[in-house]
Image: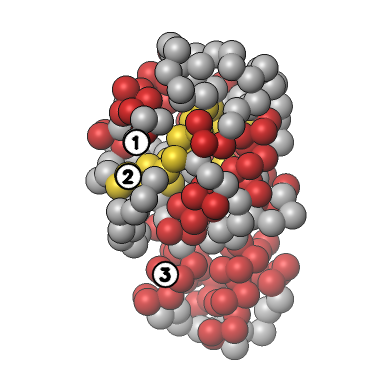
Amino acid sequence: MTSTVPALGTRTAEGSALQAVLLDMDGTLVDTEGFWWDAEVEVFARLGHTLDEAWRDVVVGGPMTRSAAFLIESTGADVTVAELTVLLNNGFEDRISRTLPLMPGAARLLAELASHDVPMALVSASHRRIIDRVLDSIGAHHFTLTVAGDEVSRTKPHPAPYLLAASGLGAEPARCAVIEDTATGVAAAEAAGCRVVAVPSVAPIPAGAGRTVVPSLEHVDLPFLQGLMTL
């Protein structure tokens, strides 16, 4: 995890109660959730197994170890979680080396938040090797810190990654806006006490208390995020 930590109450968004914005990566900033599923399908095909499309909703947004364990148990494949993790990361990394599409509105939102000196953290269940590759494309300079799934003892849906990010930015979780695309990520952010913007990618996410659901990042800007703090 990288860290350049500002003092609490500094670099806030022009006097609003918003102290920081914490963003998921896959499916939120980059259109890669399909890449993970394609990699999983390909790896298991090589192992002699066909994945059920219905499992996609189960594994999306989760930590690699949970997804790998589920798929091994469901298929009976002769592979360990550790071995499968390497195969999946290799397959995914190969795909993002060819193309890495940003989600609609992502580049504009990152630029807007940066121009107003809003502290940002990237909080992902993906491993560090994957995050660093993606950051080459979306711009590591946007983020004061990044949290990877293989750098925390408990990852999403546990609140630890978002609590770590808020603490690293010197921010109160309740004054952080989190942007997520999966139910797993939303659960982690809500458990941490953050305000949540859900932008569903693969599976729908219902509206709820302290949670705002929008169809895309094109509906999210700084005034929108500042308004979440008054809800």
Residue at the location (61% across, 68% down)? Answer: 66
Query: Would you say residue 225 is visible in this rendering?
Result: no
Question: What is the spatial separation of the Cα atoms under label 3 and label 1, in whole angstroms?
Answer: 33 Å
Measuring 69% from the left and 72% from the top, which residue is drawn there?
81
Q: Amino acid at mark 3?
A: Arg
Question: Residue 28: x, y in percent?
Answer: 41, 44
Percent from the top left, x then y, of residue 41? Answer: 47, 71
Report the number of numbered marks: 3
CB atoms at circles 1 and 2 under 8 Å apart?
yes
Q: Earlier in the sequence, mark 3 or mark 1?
A: 3
Disc 2 to disc 3, C-alpha distance: 24 Å
The image quarter containing residue 103 is top left
Q: Which residue is mark 1?
A: 231
Kind of residue at disc 1: Leu
* Residue 113 to residue 231: above or below: above
Label number found at residue 77: none
- Give the label, 3 or 1, closer to the camera: 1
Residue 144, position as x, y percentages in the image: 61, 24
SS at mark 1 in the image: loop
Mark 3: few/some/many CA within 10 Å (<14, 14-19, 20+): many
Classify residue 204 by image quadrant.
bottom left
Report the residue marked by disc 3: 56
Sequence-first disc among 2 and 3? 3
Image side of residue 64 versus residue 225, left or right: right
